[in-house]
Image: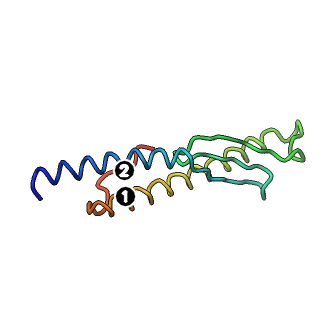
Amino acid sequence: MDFLKMMQAAQQFSGKMQELQETLARLTLTGTAGGGLVTVEVDGRGTMKRVAIDPSVVQPADVEMLEDLVAVATQEAQKKARAEAEAEMQRLAGGLGLGALPFKLPF
């Protein structure tokens, strides 16, 4: 591959990366815990957007359990976001003929 082609591929990749970042920001993924008693929504980057808690679990004696459920639901949603972002990056790299990515995603 000559230098000009490499530069063009890099420009294409940069543009596709920007599109991917925008797509991931619009994506919504959900994690749940406690059989659906706690639900967390994150965007495709893993940023938490919303927490929903079933009123039946909000009792003063259950605060510690509730905190644990929120943490578990958040981790589940973030894991889904990372997996989705990685899959999109692999599709992007494959479409540009770059093969597998030689680095981990920054999020």
- For image coordinates 90% across by 47% down, the residue present is 56
**Callout 2: SS:** helix
- For image coordinates 29% across by 60% down, the residue present is 96
Between 97 and 64, the one lying in front of the other is: 97
**Residue type marked 1:** Leu
Between 85 and 59, the one lying in front of the other is: 85
Image quarter in which the N terminus is found: bottom left
Q: Nearer the viewer, mark 1 or mark 2?
A: 2
Residue 87 horizontal/vertical position (percent): 45, 60
User: Which circle marks residue 16 in the picture?
Assistant: 2
Residue 8 horizontal/vertical position (percent): 21, 50
* Other residues around mark 1 within 10 Å, as few (<14) / some (14–19) / many (≥20): some
Question: Is 25 left or right of 91, judged from the image as shown?
Answer: right
Between 79 and 47, the one lying in front of the other is: 47
Residue 99 horizontal/vertical position (percent): 28, 63
**Residue type marked 2:** Lys
* Other residues around mark 2 within 10 Å, as few (<14) / some (14–19) / many (≥20): some
Check disc 1 and report the residue beneath it.
92
* Residue 49 sits above or below residue 100 on the image: above
